[in-house]
Image: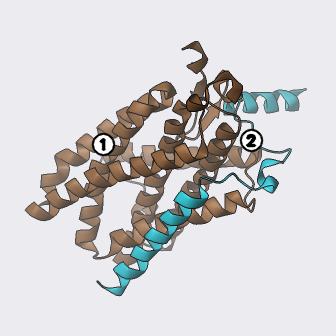
Amino acid sequence: MARHRALQMFGRSGNPAFRSKAFTQRSSDFSTSEVMTLSGTVNKTGLYLLLCFMTAAWTWNQFYASGEPASIMPYLIFGLIGGLVAALITIFKPTAAPISAPIYALLEGFAIGGISAVAEASYEGIVIQAVGLTFFTLASLLMAYKTGLIKPTENFRLMLFAATGGVALLYLVNFIMMFFGASIGFIHSNGLVGIGFSLVVVAIAALNLVLDFDFIEQAAEQGAPKYLEAYGAFSLLVTLIWLYLEILRLLTKLYSRN
Amino acid sequence: MDSNSLFFGLMIIGSLGVFFYFGKFRASIKQRDRSNKIDWTQSLWSKIRSKKQEKDD
């Protein structure tokens, strides 16, 4: 088990920064079934997306069955808090990822389903647009990464970390201000500054996908342990959910201008 | 089905198809054989610390 005591995570999006043995261990240290592969990670990502979709559909149906936003609040709060706990467990104990990552996907689905249903009730057709744009960004950046069009470097990682940290800090300050009945105006505004801010955040979230791809690619190439498949898929899912929510927020701002 | 759902529905299916198909392939040699790749074996903190150390020296 000591050889699995390997990772140290860093950063808001779940993009990991390896520090010790697991990443540098070669495939010869493990039997073939214990080694991380690209296809295993992709399959797990698909599975987690499916789990997330299932619980999202559950909350969505609850909303449309009752027609009351209040009816989904318990699911939303349960999903957000439970998802946060599952995410923290995965980040600080990556060996638990094969169990905690699917739990995270299920719990986060409850929250996303609720948020999406409320958005759809306000602006019809917005959810399918947000989902479409999220997956289109995923596919485009995957191709850009695989072909070498985007080459992540240490500076790229450092700048993205700073930008992601900046956004996280801004959201945290806004969250605290909300307890005092105030907020940072441009985060929610549908003016040009608000839309520009959302565009920047969408770009930052999207570029985090490139870091996820690079981590998964390198880990698989170096024959990292099998549990990192679940961790890599978890990382991608966290970034995808963030990207989806930011795109949804951007579209909401654009719709509300009409 | 309206045109909005059709267009974005096809976008979802196509994008997922690309992800599940090409995601299983290794990246190009251009991407893999570089000297400035991210070193995931080192944490970002230690990178920042070593950069700072270099500057101080």
Direction from residue A244 to residue A151 in the image, left or right: right
Residue at position x 81%, y 56% from top? B30
Secondary element under disc 2, as helix, strand or loop, is: loop
Q: Residue lying at the far front in this picture: please name it.
A: A32
Disc marking residue A107: 1
- Please determine whether, in this image, residue A173 is positioned above or below residue A91: below
Percent of width and height locating residue A257: 38, 79
Nearest the viewer among A155 and A96 is A96
- Whether residue B6 sits left or right of residue A97 in the image: it is left
Give me the chain letter of mark 2.
B
Which image quadrant: the C terminus of chain A?
bottom left
Closest to the observer, B29 or A20 = B29
Q: Which chain is brown?
A: A
User: Could you say which disc has been placed on residue B38 in the image?
Assistant: 2
Mark 2 crowd level (few <14, some 14–19, many ≥20, 10 Å Cα): many
In terms of depth relative to the viewer, which is nearer, A6 or A66? A6
Quadrant position of the N terminus of chain A in the picture: top right
Residue A14 bears which disc, if any?
A: none
Q: Are marks 1 and 2 on the same chain?
A: no
Q: What type is the residue that disc 1 sits on?
A: Leu
User: How far apart are labels 1 and 2 at the CA level?
Assistant: 32 Å
Q: Position of residue B26 (x, y in %)?
A: 69, 51
Mark 2: amino acid: Ile
Q: Please report, as a chain letter, where disc 1 is located.
A: A
Secondary structure type for disc 1: helix
- Tell whether A82 sits left or right of A145: left
Q: Position of residue A177 (x, y in %)?
A: 37, 46
